[in-house]
Amino acid sequence: MDDKQLMVQIAAGDQAALQTLLRRHGPLLQYILKPILTDPREREECLADISLRLWQRAGDYAPERGQFVPWLTVLARNMALNRREQLQTAIRSLGREEQQLFFRKYYYCQSTAQIAAELGITERAAEGRLYRLRQRLRNLLGGDLL
């Protein structure tokens, strides 16, 4: 069964068709997402978002406008870029100290002990700040990203 037929079946509510399509194009989706979303958890979340979008909007795919694979790759790329942009916007909305804490932990991969030592606080206090930071970002992003 080709991709166009699968999309017709997905639009009709066939979950097995969606799984077939995702198995068929999973490696391609991973290839597209990996350079944009370096965190494996973010890629998995994005793949889930792509699956949901395919399920909800399978009827939007119009074969007469172009082939399926380029359509899917554009969808995946745009969703990954939007996800990264949302995170960057949320980070920019944080205060200066929260931004520094975020970068220390998630970009520079510093341990909680190292962060605590450099900030002159206890590890427990650093853990508390990181917890509150994750909660704030979850609220800003509307879900579980970190």
Image (tube, rainbow, N blue to C red):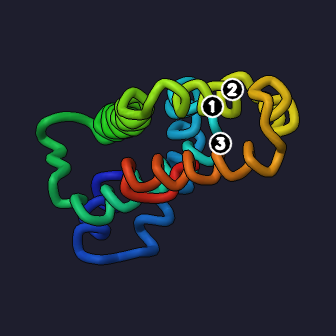
- Distance from disc 1 to disc 3, alpha carbons, whole Å, reads 21 Å
Q: Is residue 51 left or right of residue 97?
A: left
In the image, residue 78 lies at what x, y percent? 33, 33
Q: Secondary structure at mark 3?
A: helix
The one of 141 and 2 positioned closer to us in this rendering: 141
Estimate the x, y position of residue 77 in percent, counting from the top left.
39, 31
Q: Which residue is pictured at 48% across the width and 24% down the height?
A: 96
Name the kind of residue labelled 1 in the image.
Leu
Q: Which residue does the image show at 32% across and 39% down from the upper left?
A: 75
Quarter of the figure with residue 120:
top right
The disc label shown at residue 40, or none: 3
Q: Are marks 1 and 2 in contact (CB under 8 Å)?
A: yes
Q: Nearer the viewer, residue 114 or 2?
A: 114
* Residue 9 image offset from top left, x and y in percent: 29, 69
| Residue holding disc 2 | 104
- Image: 43 above or below 33: below
The quarter holding residue 54 reads bottom left
SS of the residue under disc 1 = helix
Tag 2: residue type? Arg
Label 3: how many Cα within 10 Å (few below 14, some 14–19, many 20+): few
Q: Is residue 111 above or below residue 20?
A: above
The residue at the far front in this view is 120
- Looking at the image, is 83 positioned above or below residue 108? below
Relative depth, front residue between 36 and 75: 36
Query: Which mark is drawn over residue 101?
Result: 1
Determine crowd level at label 1: few under 14, some 14-19, many 20+ residues with C-alpha closer than 10 A. many
The secondary structure type at the circle numbered 2 is: helix
